[in-house]
């Protein structure tokens, strides 16, 4: 099986999305902060949609407890998530530019790590880390768009997951209430729905078709 | 009156930090939007709520 050329690949995407939309997708740099169930799902969706560059950031390695919902394979256990996801994305979208980083994002380093991103996806697990990233990016990178997630645990209806525009630069996906600490924890399907909301919000921001506030 | 998360509250003249202390919000888990902008955490003590302000306190829950 031969891999199509870069020109053939771009042509196929352009036939799907149209030239104007695809040029916006191709020109975009999206950072994904946290490569768990949300982040790995967002990455796969955006890679397929033809986003130009993905910055993938996570400090952690692939663990057996991740495989029920995250886009990794059994043979990748123990690998750094940023590296494992890069390998998987290369198989899906060979001409995607990927910048994998094995780093823990903090208030001190987020400006350096995220300065090249047009859009930052918050895909952390811990509520305090989510708040840190939203507050930190809002203050330190005032022109960057944020797409965050809150509330996707459990087996409640997937219909409760939604996307809300909080400010002109900040979108929030999730049901905003289902905490991972309660009930059955994270389930692959509901996390995937939330990840798809985040990826979809990214595409809509790039297409300039976003929710009214 | 100051509108916070959809409720009209008589808070004009208070700081945002003083208001948050009266609530159950965990300051480490929130972002606060006021009139379309996220307020930096370092400005909670100096942000004085005024009549007509519209705020939303976004409180994050875990999972990802």
Image (cartoon, coloured by chain):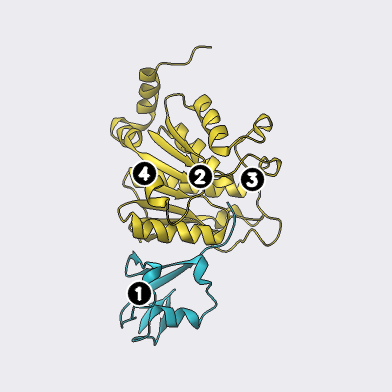
Chain colours: A yellow, B cyan
Tell which tag, 2 or 4, sits nearer the viewer: 2
Q: Position of residue A161 (x, y in %)?
A: 54, 55
Position above or below: A37 against A25: below
Q: Which residue is the site of mark 3? A: A188
Kindly identify which residue carries mark 2. A103
In the rendered image, residues at marks 4 and 1 fall on the same chain:
no
Front residue of A7 and A159: A7
Kindly indicate whether the residues beneath marks 4 and 3 are on one polypeptide chain.
Answer: yes
Q: How far apart are labels 1 and 3 at the CA level?
A: 37 Å
Identify the mark at residue A117; answer none if there is no mark.
Answer: 4
Question: Residue A198's x, y, as percent?
Answer: 47, 48
Neighbourhood count class around disc 3 (C-alpha, 10 Å): few under 14, some 14–19, many 20 upward? some
Name the residue furthest top. Answer: A1
User: Which SS class for mark 4?
Assistant: loop
Which residue is under mark 1? B54
Q: Label 3 lies in what chain?
A: A
Q: Residue at the spot x=64%, y=32% of the render? A: A76
Q: Nearer the viewer, mark 3 or mark 2?
A: 2
């Amino acid at each position: 099986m031969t891999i199509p050329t870069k020109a053939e690949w771009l042509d196929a995407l352009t036939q799907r999305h149209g030239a104007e939309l695809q040029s916006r997708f191709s020109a975009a740099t999206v950072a994904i902060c946290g490569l768990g169930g949300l982040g790995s799902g967002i990455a796969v969706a955006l890679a397929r949609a033809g986003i130009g560059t993905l910055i993938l950031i996570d400090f952690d390695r692939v663990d057996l407890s991740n495989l029920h919902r995250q886009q990794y394979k059994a043979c990748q256990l123990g690998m750094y998530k940023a590296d494992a996801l890069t390998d998987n994305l290369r198989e899906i979208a060979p001409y995607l530019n990927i910048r994998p980083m094995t780093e823990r994002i903090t208030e001190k380093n987020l400006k350096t790590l995220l300065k090249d991103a047009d859009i930052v996806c918050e895909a952390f697990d811990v509520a305090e880390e989510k708040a840190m990233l939203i507050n930190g990016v809002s203050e330190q990178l005032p022109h960057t768009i944020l797409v965050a997630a809150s509330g996707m645990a459990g087996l409640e209806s997937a219909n409760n997951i939604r996307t809300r525009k909080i400010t002109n630069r900040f979108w929030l996906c999730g049901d905003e209430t289902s905490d991972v600490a309660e009930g059955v924890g994270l389930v692959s399907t509901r996390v995937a729905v939330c990840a798809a909301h985040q990826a979809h919000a990214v595409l809509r921001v790039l297409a300039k078709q976003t929710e009214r506030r | 009156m100051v509108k916070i998360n959809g409720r009209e509250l008589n808070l004009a003249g208070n700081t945002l930090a003083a208001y948050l202390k009266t609530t159950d919000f965990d300051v480490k888990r929130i972002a606060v939007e006021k009139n379309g902008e996220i307020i930096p955490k370092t400005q909670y003590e100096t942000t004085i709520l005024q009549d007509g302000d519209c705020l939303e306190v976004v409180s994050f829950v875990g999972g990802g």
